[in-house]
Amino acid sequence: MNLSLLKDIDDNNQVQQMNLDRVNETMRENIDLKARIEHLEHVIQQLQSETETI
């Protein structure tokens, strides 16, 4: 293999790793947002219950 091809392969591997890192970060953010939504839905239910009581 020539040096140029090895560099291209290395560059490609780096780009793939960067993309995987971005996907993983996005998935973590998605999980965090889903947990936040569930929490807020619970708070809304509690507030609606209190409003009905008043």
Image (tube, rainbow, N blue to C red):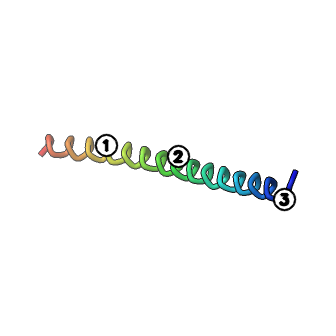
Q: Amino acid at mark 2?
A: Met
Identified at 53% across, 49% down, the residue is 28
Residue 13 shown left or right of residue 36 in the figure: right
Q: CA distance from mark 3 to mark 1?
A: 57 Å
Q: CA distance from mark 2 to mark 3?
A: 36 Å
The earlier-in-sequence mark between 2 and 1 is: 2
The earlier-in-sequence mark between 3 and 1 is: 3
Residue 10 shown left or right of residue 33 in the figure: right
Give the numbered dot on residue 3. 3
Q: Amino acid at mark 3?
A: Leu
Name the residue at the right extreme: 1
Q: Amino acid at mark 1?
A: Glu
Identified at 42% across, 49% down, the residue is 33
How packed mark 2 is, by other alpha carbons closer than 10 Å (few <14, some 14-19, many 20 or more), is few
Give the numbered dot on residue 54. none
Q: CA distance from mark 2 to mark 1?
A: 21 Å
> Which-is-in-front pick, marks 2 and 3?
3
> Which-is-in-front pick, marks 2 and 1?
2
Identified at 51% across, 50% down, the residue is 26
Where residue 2 sits, quadrant-wise, is bottom right
Instruction: Identify residue for label 2.
Output: 27
How packed mark 1 is, by other alpha carbons closer than 10 Å (few <14, some 14-19, many 20 or more), is few
SS of the residue at dot 1? Answer: helix
Instruction: Identify residue for label 1.
Output: 41
